[in-house]
Image (cartoon, rainbow, N blue to C red):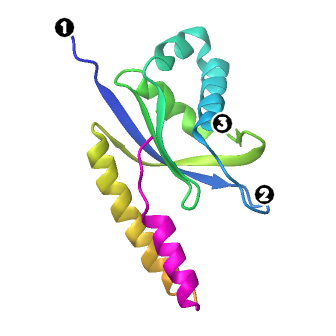
Amino acid sequence: MVRVKSRYIVVQILPHESCTGNVSFNDGILTKSFLKYIKQYYGDFGVGSVENGFRIKYCNDKTKIAIIRCRHKPHRFVASILPLITVIGDYRAKYRTLYTGATIMQCNKFIVNHQKAFLDRMVGRIASAKERNDLIKNVLEFELA
C-alpha cells in the first residue's frame, strides 16, 4: 500500500474594499470557486488531479482564515491558482497564502500564533470590555470540519 500524502495551505481571504456589510464565506463557496478557476487555467487534467483529496478543513468568518487540504503533488496547482482568484461566490476578494505545511497540527500552531498577534493589534483599538471579550472568543475558536 502507498500512503497518500497531503499538504495543508493556510490562506487569508481579503475582501475587496467595495464590499460593504458582513461578508461571509463557507467551505462550499470556496470549493466551487477553487475548482472553477483550476478548470479555467489547468483544464480537465488540473481538476482531475486536484479534486481527489481536496477539502476545506477550516474556515473562520471572523478572521477570514481557511485551511485547504489537497494531495501532495497537485498542491502546486492550488498554490499557483491562489493569486489569480478574484471572485469568491458573489464577492470580489483575493487570497493571501500564510503557510503551507505537511500536517494539520503545524497549521493549527501557526493559526494560533497568527490569531494571537491579530488580537494583540486589535484589542488595543476596542474601548468596550464586552466587545473585547466577544472578539477574543470569536477569534480564538478553532474547530476543524
The CA span between labels 2 and 1 is 48 Å
What are the residue bounds of the magenta stretch? 127-145
Residue drawn at x 58%, y 46% is 95
Q: Is residue 112 above or below residue 85?
A: below
> How many numbered markers are drawn?
3
The reply to whether the C-beta atoms of the residues labelled 3 and 2 are less than 8 Å apart is no
Q: Quadrant of residue 9?
A: top left
- Give the residue pinned by disc 2: 19
Frontmost of labels 3 and 2 is 3
Q: Position of residue 39 (x, y in %)?
A: 63, 18
- Give the residue pinned by disc 1: 1
- Give the residue pinned by disc 3: 29
Residue drawn at x 34%, y 64% is 113
Q: Position of residue 123 (x, y in %)?
A: 49, 82
Of residues 57 and 118, the one drawn nearer to the viewer in this rendering: 57
The CA span between labels 3 and 2 is 17 Å
Ranked by sequence position, the earlier of labels 2 and 1 is 1
Task: Kindly identify the amino acid type of the residue bearing the numbered disc 2.
Answer: Cys
Task: Kindly identify the amino acid type of the residue bearing the numbered disc 3.
Answer: Ile
Q: Position of residue 48 (x, y in %)?
A: 52, 11
Indicate the secondary structure of the residue bearing disc 3.
helix
Task: Kindly identify the amino acid type of the residue bearing the numbered disc 1.
Answer: Met
| Residue 130 is inside the magenta segment | yes
The CA span between labels 3 and 1 is 34 Å
Whether residue 43 is visible: yes
Q: Quadrant of residue 29?
A: top right
**SS majority, magenta:** helix
Q: Position of residue 82 (x, y in %)?
A: 56, 38
